[in-house]
Image: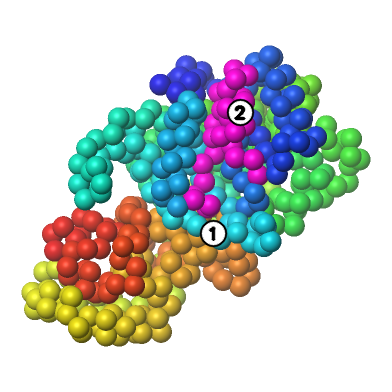
Amino acid sequence: MSRFAEILRKKDFVITFELVPGRSTRTRHFRAIMRFAEEVAEAGLFDALSITDNAGGHPALAPEALGRELKRLGHEPIIHFSCKDKNRNVIESDLLDLDREGLRTLLVVTGDYPRYGYRGRAKPVFDLDSVQLLRLISEMRKGYVLPPEVPGGGVTLPPVPFFPGCVVNPFKWTEAETLLQYWKLLKKIRAGASFVITQVGFSARKYQELLFFLQEEGLSGFPALAGILVMDQRLARILYRGIVPGITVPEGLYRRLMGLSEEEARKEALERAARLMAVCQGLGYRGVHLCGAPLEKEAVHQLLVLYEEYRPHWREFLPEFAEVPEKAYFLYRKDPRTGLNLPERKPLSPSRSRNLLYFFSRIAHKLFFTRKGPLARPLRFLAHRLSGSSWEPLFTRLEYGIKKVLYDCQECGDCSLPHLAFLCTQSQCAKYLLNGPCGGSRDRWCEVYPGRRRCVFVRIYERLSPEERPQVFLKELSPRNWNLFRTSSWLNFYLGRTTLSPKKVKDL
Ligand code: SF4
C-alpha cells in the first residue's frame, strides 16, 4: 500500500504542501525548494509534499525528478500527473518509470493548456483526459490485460500498486459549470480515484457544497482535501487579473489585501490561510492541501501553530469566507443562520439554446443509427458492401463534407456527436476532452478563449433537459481510436469498429 494511503487511513486530518519546480535546477528558487524540503522533513511538518507538472502550461523540471529527491529525504511525494503534454504511450512509459522509482501516489489532472515553450507555444496533446487516464491506471493496478491483437498480446501484466487521486473545482459560479465539475468528479471516482483535492478557493459555502454533494452520492467517507491558498500581495495581483484558469479572487478580499503594507499582507496571508484550514476541518474535510505558501520553515510552522489555535473557533470565521460574486450559483439552498448550505437541492434549469440543427441531428440519428430501427438491417448490409470497395473513399469524403459544414468535424472516424448533444468537442474544446470540462472555465467561457468562445461542455449542458444531463455526463467515454482517423464513422458504426462507447457497439 502507498504510504499516503496509509496516512489517509490512520490520520483524522492530513496536511499536504504543494511545490512548484521551475525551469532550472541551478537557480535560487530550486535551492530554496531543496532547503525547505530538508528542513520540513526534519521537523515532520507535512504528511506529504506534492509536485506540480509543468504548472501554468510552462515547461519545468519533471515532477518525478524532484520526487526522487524528496523520497530520499524521507518525504511522501504526490506526483501531479497531467494529460497535456503526453500521448497515451508516453503516459504508460512514464507510469512504468514512476513505479520503478517507487513514486506511486499520483494526482491525476487534465493539465493547464500549454502556454510558452521553446520558440513558441507547445503543441497541446491531451490524448487521454483525466477520466481515461484514471481508468488506465486502474487497469494497471489490477494487472493490465494486453489486447490479443498487439505484439505479445493476450497476457496479463503484473499489477502496479498506484494510489491515484484527482482534483475538482467547486468554485464555479454558474449552474452548468458547478454540476459539470461534480458529475465529472463522480466519473473520476468510478474510474479509480482514491482521494480528491479541491482547487483553491475563498468561499466556505462552496467548500461545504462539495461535501454535501459527496454525501448525497453516498460518498461521505471519500477522502476530500481542501486546496488552500496562502495569498500574499504578489500572488493576489497575478490571480486578480484572472489569468490563472479556475481561480477567482473576490473583489473585497483583494482590496483589503492591497490596502495593507507588504509585511502586514504577508502576515495576514498566513493568518487567513490558518483560519480557512480551521473552517475546512470544521466543515468535515479530511485534510488540506496548502498552495502558494512561502518556502520558509518558520513561516509554515507559524501557520500550523495558528491553525491549531483557531481550530475550536472555526464557526466564528465563517463570515470572513462569505464573499462570493453577485448572482453566484449554489447547488443547495442557503442556511440563513450560518450563511452555509441547507441539505436541500435546487431544481435544475430547463434546457435552452436548442437549435434547428440539434433537432435535425436527433431525428437523423434516430433514423439512421439505431440498432433496432427499421433501417438498421439494410444499412448494415450496405455498409458491408461499401467497406473496402472503390466507393468507400467517395462515401467517406461525402460524409466529412456534410459533417464539416454542420459540426466542424475533425474526421475522427469515432464520432462522439450522439453522445454529446451533437456538439463536437474535438473541434470545439481546446483540450479535446470527452468526459466533461477541465477546471478552467470562467463564467461559462473556455479558459483558452475567454470572452470569445463558450466552454463546449456548458453548451452541451444547456442543450440537454434536466433528466438527460446526468445520463450524458455520467457516461464514461473511452479514448479516441486513432486507427479510425479519416475513415468513415458512419461505416464504422455499422461495422462495429467505433470504440468511444464499446457497450453500444457490441449489441449492434
Ligand atoms: S472548452 Fe471547456 S473543457 Fe475545453 S478547454 Fe475550454 S474550458 Fe476546458
Which label sits in the foreground, 1 or 2? 1
Asked where in the image residue 124 lies, by quadrant, the reply is bottom right
- Please check the rendered image and state whether residue 77 is part of the magenta-colored stretch, yes or no: yes
Q: In this orientation, which residue lies closer to the viewer: 438 or 314?
A: 438
Count the labels in the image.
2
**Residue at image coords 36%, 43%:** 136
Query: Would you name the residue on which mark 1 appears?
Result: 124
Residue at the image position 82 percent from the left and 44 percent from the top: 233
Q: As shown in the figure, which amino acid type bears the numbered disc 2? A: Leu
Q: Is residue 368 magenta?
A: no
Q: Is ligand 1 closer than 8 angstroms to the Cβ of mark 1?
A: no
The residue lying furthest to the right in this view is: 261
In the foreground, 326 or 140? 140
Q: Report the side of 365 relative to 287 (left or right).
A: left
Q: Nearer the viewer, residue 253 or 137?
A: 137
Residue type at mark 1 is Pro
Q: Earlier in the sequence, mark 1 or mark 2?
A: 2
Q: Secondary structure at mark 1?
A: loop
Residue 224 in the image: above or below residue 379: above
Q: Which residue is mark 2?
A: 49
Point out the stretch of residues depicted in magenta.
60-86
Q: Is label 2 in a helix, a strand or a loop? A: strand
